[in-house]
Structures are given as structure tokens and as C-alpha cells.
Image: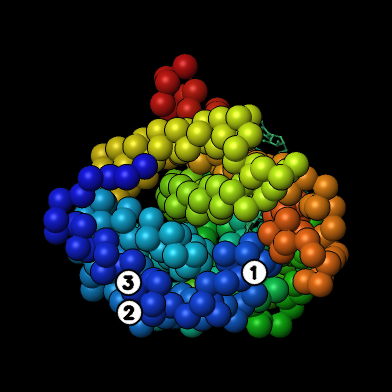
Amino acid sequence: MQLALPPDLAAFQLQLRDFFENQVPMRLREPFLSGARLERDWVVGTHQVLFEAGIAVPHWPVEWGGKPWTPLQRHIWSEELYRAGVFPPLSSNTHLVGPVLLAFGTEEQKRRFLPPTASCDIFWAQGFSEPEAGSDLASVRTTAVLDGDEWVVNGQKTWTSLAHMSDWIFCLVRTDPDAPKRQQGISFLLVDLKSPGITVRPIRLIDGDAEVNEVFFDNVRVPADQLVGEVNKGWDYAKYLLGNERVSVAQIGHTKLRLTQAKRFAQERLADGSALIDDRAVAMRLAELEVQLAALEVTALRVVGESADGKPDPASSVLKLRGTQLLQDVVAFVLDLAGGDALAAEADDGSGITAWARRAAAFHLNTRKVSIYGGSNEIQRGIIASSVLGL
Ligand SMILES: Cc1cc2nc3c(=O)[nH]c(=O)nc-3n(C[C@H](O)[C@H](O)[C@H](O)COP(=O)(O)OP(=O)(O)OC[C@H]3O[C@@H](n4cnc5c(N)ncnc54)[C@H](O)[C@@H]3O)c2cc1C
């Protein structure tokens, strides 16, 4: 979709486009463009280029490194970022723990943690899910017991994205096992992953990669001042965080990037001497995806524009649900364009099989995750039924 922007916003857009295309080195953009596995050096490297330019956390308050931008300017920022193939600033920092600290942290916690969170000098992992607590997050069993001026943590987290390359983890822990409601006995704790007693064990997934982990806590001692906000109020903070997560995982800019790439692949790839894009069925599928994406973008702009004080709107569940479905549809389309070449995942550059086709199957498998994390799409349907439709 092409938004007709007024001149000042059009100039703003061009300025960002110039920055992303010319100031973020191709060395940092290429891995994301090609759908390569996430590596700490280019993820952090990209984040820090944006931080140094003052545009890593535009949605934060200005005093903490944000920009006085309108929701539409932030949307343009995101559009242009993805358009250039720039991996976004680490969302566990910028959209998850950062906003929680801003909203609920003490002044001391803000001063200590917000600057290195904005700059990615701390790489955060999210320690919410446990083996018996995924969708039913209020069942978390990892305990934290106060001993003097330290919390002693025992238990296990799982599916923890990128914990093997993270510095710190923010966790939901049970601080009152006897609370009348399960949600009332949970707290939000910040833990240094280098603390004695922590073991991080990678889990290999269906795409062959190991980007998630199990994290074990064995009598890990955590200074009491690393508990965010109030004891036993962690559930409120988690709900706030999950609302933000759903908006950030709608991935509209990302889907646009992948759809633009798919169009190029369909133009380049030949079948019986003709470009695949000249096949009527391929062209129709592409057009359908483009229309669906444009509709989602308009909805996203409306939700972003209407959410007061940056508070997540319940409609964020609609964005999460539809956004992740569309990303999966686009990635499945790329897999179909690759056809049998997608089976040659282990082939090398000399094989004559294009790199995107070799990567298509792993990327398709990896993208299954987007309808699971951030609250599975089934859970989003439940939220839409109760909070949006009032059923
Ligand atoms: C790649 C990946 C990365 C992840 N990264 C992180 C991370 O960094 N940190 C973190 O804390 N967690 C992370 N997660 C965990 C993720 O949030 C959970 O997997 C998710 O919440 C689902 O929980 P579960 O796996 O325990 O499945 P379950 O909750 O056991 O659900 C199993 C199935 O039942 C369905 N279901 C469950 N309850 C309901 C219901 N009430 N109504 C309808 N259907 C229902 C679910 O949709 C799902 O299909 C990640 C997961 C993946 C796959």
C-alpha cells in the first residue's frame, strides 16, 4: 500500500530511507534479508547503529531516548526499517522489559537499567513460559523466596528465545504460593544470567536451529532491589507487557519485506521458459496477499492511532492473529515458488540452486513459531471473543 503522505511526512520518510539504506552497513542487513539464523553480533550491531543515531527506541519517553513522534511517524520508521532489510532493535529490550520498567520500575531501577536496555548493552531474554505454564501462564512454579536482602530462585523456564546469547533475563516468579488467586502470588524479577546456579540448555527445533532454550535456576541468589515494582503484582506487569508484545509481533513491515522478495523471486524464477509471475495462479495468489496485507496495515494504523497513552488496545489481539497468519502465508508462498529446490537445504553456492530457495524450507519451518509465541493464536481468538466482541 502506498500512503499519500503530506510533504513534511514525505520528507521525514525519505530521510529515514536514506539513513537505513546508506548508514546501516549491508554486512548487518544481509543476514536478515536472507533469513539467516540470528547471531548476537549482527543483532546487537544493528541495534547499536540505530541507538547511536537516536532512533532505537522512538516509542519511549524523550528523556529516556525516545522521539516526540506521532504514531504515524513511528509507523513510517518501522516501514522504512523493514523496507531496507534492517533487523529491528531487540524487541525483548524495546517492547517488553523497557516499557515495564518505564511504567512500574523505581527511579533507581530506571536509572540503572533503561540506558543499557535502550543501547542493547544488556541483551534481555524473556523468562515467562515453563513446562506446565505456557498459555496458562498463571501456573508458573518457579519460586523466589526472600532470604535477607536476596531472593533465592528455584525452578525452570522453557522456550526462552536467544537465552544462550543473552546477558540478563526478566522472569515471572512465584513469591506467594498461598495467595487466594494464582495471579496474586507472582512477581517480576530481573536476573543476571551469569549468576551462579543458572544453566542454559539450547533446544534444537524442526528447522535445525537452536534459538530457544531451557533455563534452570538452582538456588540462584538475586538482590532484592531487582524485583520490579511491588511484590506479588507481577501479573499486572506481565499483562501490560503481553499487550505490547502482541502489537510488536504483528510484523506488518516484516511481511511486506518478505512479500516484496517473493515478488522478485517469482519474476526471476522460470518454469517451462516463462517467469513464474506470468502464471495466472501465481499472480492471483500474490495479488490476494497484497490486498490482505494492505487491509491489515490500515487496521494497524487505526489501532495504533486510537490506543490512548500508549496503552495496548484489546484489538492488538486481532493484529497479532492476522499479522502472523499473513506472514506464514507469505513464507509458504515462497516455499511453493522454490518447489523441489527447497529440499536442497544443505547444498552450497556452487550447486546452481539459488540461496533463497535453499533457505525456504528452514525459514518456513522457523516461521511456525509466530502463531505460538506472544500468546498462541487460539488464545488470541479467545481474547477477541471476550474483550473485543463481548461474547
Ligand atoms: C520459537 C518460540 C519462542 C518462544 N520464546 C519464548 C520466550 O522467549 N520466552 C517465553 O517466556 N516464552 C517463549 N515461548 C513460549 C510461548 O509463549 C509458548 O509456547 C506459548 O505461550 C504456548 O504455550 P505452550 O507451548 O506451553 O503450549 P500450551 O499452552 O500447552 O498449548 C498447547 C496448544 O493448546 C492450545 N490452547 C491452550 N490453551 C488454550 C485455550 N484456553 N483455548 C484454546 N486453545 C488453547 C494452544 O493454542 C496450543 O495450540 C516461545 C515459543 C516458541 C515456539
Distance CA(mark 1)–CA(mark 2): 23 Å
- Spot occupied by residue 116 in the image (x, y as percentages of width and height): 43, 80
Q: Foreground: 322 or 313?
A: 322
Q: Residues within 10 Å of mark 3 (few under 14, many from 20)?
A: few
Residue drawn at 83 percent across, 47 percent down: 340
- At x 32%, y 53%, the residue is 75
Answer yes or no: disc 2 within 8 Å of ligand 1. no
SS type, badge 1: loop
Q: Is residue 350 above or below residue 302?
A: below
- Between 285 and 331, the one lying in front of the other is 285
How many numbered marks does the figure carry?
A: 3
Q: Which residue is mark 1?
A: 38
Q: Quadrant of the N terminus?
A: top left
Q: Is residue 130 visible?
A: no
Looking at the image, which residue sits at the far front? 273
The amino acid type, in three-letter code, at marker 1 is: Leu
Callout 2 amino acid: Ala
Tag 3: residue type?
Answer: Asp
Residue labelled with disc 3: 18
The residue at which mark 2 appears reads as 53
